[in-house]
Amino acid sequence: MADVYAVFGTLLALGIVFPGMLMAWWLLFPRVVDRAETRLNQTPGQTFALGLAGALVIGLPLLILFALPFGPTKLIASVLLMAALILASFGAAGLAASMGERLAERAGWARSDVKAFLGGALALELAAAFPLLGWLIVIPFTIVTCLGASLFALLRWMPGSQAESESSMVVEGSLAGEPQSA
């Protein structure tokens, strides 16, 4: 019976802190979360495809490392798995922000970014907690899609025209101390 309480308590604690973690990423890394949100809103198919490719690139070595009978390889695999999930959580913060904006529009809430974000994070969490459908469909697809959004956001691959990306390179280059032309 103690095992049941331990599992239930752990899941309850994770459910309580998940929106807080997403809120922390949203507040600490606003540009990364905004880029992930933009990717999720504008190119969801490409985001899912990159996430699937990233999951395969990360997942195959993890399967091999977990299968080896040598203890340190299991530790390395566990650390890599946690790093991949942390990476995907940046995309999850972008997804929560996107869901929050839609929720605020439909609910007719007054302009409150924090309230909308927390509403989106809670809606995402509740969708994932729904028995069977949430566990077997929502969670895997969300993790893969959020991994793709995080990869796009961290690599700064934004949708748009070639001219926009070239102008952003000029601005970024000028911030780095490169000479500017008049």
Image: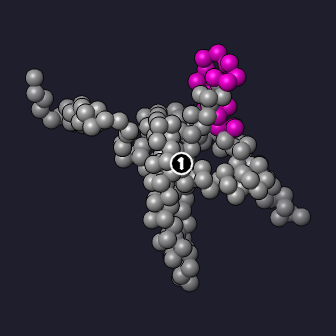
Determine if residue 10 is in view: no
Q: Residue at x 36, y 42 (%)?
A: 156
Q: How dense is the environment of label 1, judged by Cα within 10 Å: few (below 14), some, or many (20 and up)?
A: many
**Percent coordinates x, y for residue 118 in the rendering:** 65, 32
Residue 84 shown in magenta: no
Which quadrant, please, contains the C terminus? top left
Q: Residue at x 83, y 64 (%)?
A: 3
Residue 32 versus residue 76 in the image, above or below: above
Q: Residue at x 51, y 51 (%)?
A: 48
For residue 109, which quarter of the picture?
top right
Residue 119 shown in magenta: yes
**Percent coordinates x, y for residue 26 in the rendering:** 53, 35
Q: Residue at x 65, y 37 (%)?
A: 121
**Percent coordinates x, y for residue 143 in the rendering:** 58, 53
Q: Which residue in the protein does label 1 denote? A: 146
* Nearer-the-camera pick, 43 or 57: 43
Determine if residue 98 is in view: yes
- Dominant secondary structure, magenta: helix
What's the magenta region? Answer: 105-123
Which quadrant, please, contains the N terminus? bottom right
Label 1 is placed on what type of residue? Cys
The single residue placed furthest to the top in the displayed view is 110
Residue 6 versus residue 69 in the image, above or below: above
**Percent coordinates x, y for residue 54 in the rendering:** 46, 59
The single residue placed furthest to the bottom in the displayed view is 69
